[in-house]
Amino acid sequence: MGRYLPVIKTAECGSLTRAAHVLGYTQPSLGYIINNIEDELGVKLFYRDQRGVTLTEAGAPLLEVMKKIEAMEDHLRQMARAGAGGLLRVGIFPSVASQWLPAILREFYEKHPGALVKLSHQFYYLNGEIGVKDHSLDCAFFTGKCPPGLEAVALYQDPYYLVVSADHPLAGQEAVALSSLTGAERFIPTNESFDSESAIWDVYQTFSQSNLVDFEPQENHMAIAMTEAGLGMTILPGLDLVDLSANHRVKALPLAEGLTRTISLLCPRESERTPLTAAFLSIARATVEKWRAKQGGT
């Protein structure tokens, strides 16, 4: 899928809902993509109302240019695939990068010494989905529901924990229910708290209404440092805590609700994967299995 195909299909359908269905996106995802393109170009492409969308005066001529670009990019992709490309583009996020990626890449390069791997750090999970859909990424580590037209190969079920300081009144508990954390508790949100594709997005919405949220979203290492200092509590997945909690006086408490995220490798369907993507997927699955065995099978 080319970069401007979402705009082209939306114009053809006259509706974000219909275009999202045709393209295999959710409506919010498609709206996000179009807003980004409008911001990049500095023009409004569509008028939006209850009946659907129509092109603006500026959008109409730009649509014709986009159609030409889409045709040229499609031809370019076909030529690149025919050339047996040695480039693999992978979307990653920090916990995967630190825990799994070094071992994956070591074996991958041993088996494919002539290949080049380009890593793209994803700020939001949606970025990985968009990258695989528009072919700017060959695959991406991902959490959430698999979007239509792609395949999400599950690698690991990662539990979330409530993280508190070592001297917090809750630190001695074996588990804690999120529903019990109301009123005066101060919550430190992370970037994942603001990611609508994240499993803890709904949790943050609840916390922001009933608890004290005094902070902007923090990177995970900063959230841990603030928690250690007694400034509040946060929620992080176990994979992030392997390294982050090691040198800090914090306690990670299992959640009674059993909240988890499924980490997958998001890829095109098997028939559409490049040989390098298929090889990377196979190595990633084997590497994560070995890692799990070392962690005690969790």
Image (spheres, rainbow, N blue to C red):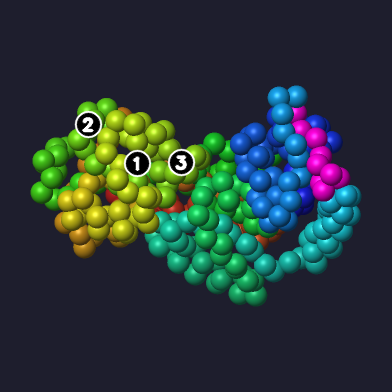
Vertical comparison of 119 with 296: above or below: below
286 or 207, which lies in front?
207
Q: Amino acid at mark 3?
A: Ser
Q: Amino acid at mark 2?
A: Gly
User: Taking the image as drawn, is residue 27 in sight?
Assistant: yes
Q: Which residue is mark 3?
A: 198
Residue at image location 30% in from the left, 54% down from the top: 223
62 or 111, which lies in front?
62
Magenta stretch, residue numbers: 52-60
Dot 1 alpha-carbon crowd within 10 angstroms: few under 14, some 14 to 19, many 20 or more: some
Vertical comparison of 118 with 279: above or below: below
Q: Is residue 95 left or right of residue 125?
A: left
The quarter of the image holding the C terminus is top left
Foreground disc of the pair 3, 2: 2
Which labelled disc corresponds to residue 41? none
| Residue sitting at the far top | 51
Q: Is residue 55 magenta?
A: yes
Q: Is residue 89 magenta?
A: no
Name the image quarter holding residue 159: top left
- Residue 28 drawn at (x, y percent): 61, 36
Residue at image location 29% in from the left, 30% down from the top: 210
58 or 93, which lies in front?
58
Please report whichever mark, 2 or 1, sits nearer to the chain's N-terminal start.
1
Q: Which residue is mark 2?
A: 183
Q: Which residue is mark 1?
A: 159
Callout 2: helix, strand or loop? loop
